[in-house]
Structures are given as C-alpha cells and as structure tokens.
Amino acid sequence: MIIIRSVKEMQIKIKNLRKQNKIGFVPTMGYFHQGHLSLMKAAKEENDIVVTSIFVNPLQFGPNEDYERYPRNEERDMQLAKNTGVDILFIPEAKDMYPSELAISMKVNKRANVLCGKSRPNHFDGVVTVVAKLFNIVLPDKVYFGMKDAQQLAIIEALISDFNFPIELVGLPTVRETDGLAKSSRNVYLNEEEKNEAVWLQKALLVGQQLITRGERSPNIVSTKIKEIINKETTGIIDYVEVLSYPGLEPITTINEQIIIATAVTFNKTRLIDNLLLDEDGKILTKIGKL
Ligand code: AMP
C-alpha cells in the first residue's frame, strides 16, 4: 500500500493507473471500524485498484460540531487499510484541498431539508463539495458508500446523476456490533451506559419495521411507536424519527413504496444516527445498486 498526501501526486499516480485498471474508491473520515473495512473489501473484490481517502472535511461540520475532536488515529488506520488490501491511502491536508476560499459553491436543493439536513444546515453542501473534488482527483470507476448514512447516499446518487460523473455508485449495508448498535467512529464518545441504551435505536426501528410488515401503512403511527420506545428505553434526546420515501426523501402519507425509517438521537454531546431501508412490503434492503 502506498500513502499519498498531496493532491497533485494523487492525480499523477491515478492518471497512469487508470489506463489499465478499474479503480474502486472509498472516501472516509478515518478512524476505521468494520463498516469502513466492509466497503474496502467490496471495492477490492470488484476493482483492480482500491483507493481509500481519509479526510475530515472542515466544510461539512457546523460551528458547534465535533470537527476539532473528531477521533483520529492515522497509524492504526494505515495498518487496517493495508491489511484489507487497499492499494492507495490518500490523506490530503485541508490546506491542499482548500488552498483558498472557494469561488464557486455547491448547494444541495433536494433531499437535504429533512433528517440530518434539518439540524445540520449546510452539512450536505460541504459533503457534495468534498466528494465532487475527491471524485475529480481520484477519477474512480466505482465508489462505495454505506447505507448507515442513507441520506448522504441518496444525495451522492443525485450528485453523480445531476453532474454526469461517469461513476457507478454502490451502497452497502450497515455493519453492526453483535448487540445491533451501528458501528460508528463516534461510538468511542459513549460510556458503557450510553452504549447499552444506544442499542435501542435499532431495536425501535425494527419494531417500526414489524408494524409495517404486519400491514401498518401510516408513517405517523410507525414513527410515533419508534419515538415512544426510544424515549422509554434511553436518556437520549430525539432529534428526529422520520418515515420518508427513498431515495427521494419526500414525505409520504401512506407506506406503499421503497422507504427509509430513520432516527437521530443525542446522548450527551454524541449524536447517533441509524436507519432501515425497506422495500414496499417492509422487507429490509441489504444492497443498493441503482437507487
Ligand atoms: P465516515 O468515515 O463516517 O465518513 O464514513 C465513511 C463511509 O463509511 C461512509 O460511506 C459511511 O456511510 C460508511 N460507514 C460508516 N459507518 C458504517 C457502518 N456501520 N456500516 C457500513 N458503512 C459505514
């Protein structure tokens, strides 16, 4: 595995490699767990060269969010990426990615004013900006994103299609702890008690899913039930529980299409998200190819 820290160097390297090789790309913010590694493994199976990037993107963090304290461990990440078969680990510096204030900004108009976008204004503008830059630097054939960040996945799909990036998008399922807690770099912020409580995010979503498979068609009844459970079983503060169409992320009055049921809950200062993507019968989707 080679490590590249300069944007220019990455561009020179990929220009040569892509003539003969299919390039798979996994963008991340580092502090790897099995969720990240599952994306790298899939990329390894489906491409000749796997590029992974680590970049904690200042543009997508709000003023009171955890940019400064976002967990970082480069040495450990390098070892894990190498063991997973990554060929190039791209770790650019913020001043190389953003040498001066951008003259042109990107604005997400759809799919962004719900779920996390509501309480994180401009977050997805920052995400699409960095992802578009990374796509242009790495020039991948296929990119891999997690369904854990389902809103991000839906917005990346729109980015690729709106701006005609010649890239195939693959969305892969959320990797969880054995107790069901979705793996997240931010889980390190949780104490034992909060970790035990956080398991209820998925449990509550699964109760919502069961209601749907048993015939419930009202998004309100489903989200109310999920809220009740999270409030009863945890000390977390609910940011949202929403049932929306997917990937359009539009409000629905009846459940009769592919949907997302999603929640965000804050434990102390740690905001956790989880979701289930369901087909029209309420069955859990495990892979997203074409959204
Ligand atoms: P992050 O480093 O948090 O920006 O995540 C990088 C990529 O890993 C994103 O595409 C995430 O959706 C994905 N990811 C994060 N957590 C998980 C997980 N538990 N399972 C699968 N993918 C994940």
Image (spheres, helix red, strand yellow):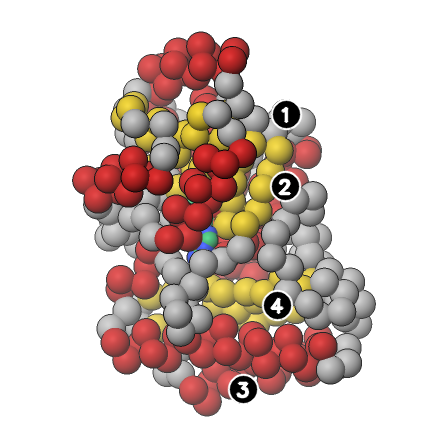
Label 1: state its secondary structure: loop
Between marks 1 and 3 in the image, the one whose residue lies nearer the viewer: 1
Label 4: state its secondary structure: strand
Q: Please give the residue where the numbered disc 4 appears in the rendered image.
A: 261
Inter-mark Cα distance, 3 to 4: 15 Å
Q: Please give the residue where the numbered disc 2 appears in the rendered image.
A: 157
Inter-mark Cα distance, 4 to 2: 19 Å
Q: Say what amino acid the circle numbered 2 marks.
A: Glu
**Where is residue 56 shown, x and y percent of the image?**
33, 41
Quadrant (top left/top right/bottom left/bottom right) for the N terminus: top left
Residue drawn at (45%, 14%) of the image: 17
Residue drawn at (69%, 43%) of the image: 290
Tell me the tag on residue 166. 1
> Label 3 crowding class (10 Å Cα cut-off): few <14, some 14-19, many 20+?
few
Q: Specify whether residue 95 is in view.
A: no
Residue drawn at (60%, 29%) of the image: 167
Label 3: state its secondary structure: helix
**CB contact under 8 Å: marks 1 and 4:** no
> Ligand 1 closer than 8 Å to the CB at disc 2?
no
Q: Please give the residue where the numbered disc 3 appears in the rendered image.
A: 228
**Residue lying at the far front of the rendered structure:** 45
Q: Earlier in the sequence, mark 3 or mark 4?
A: 3
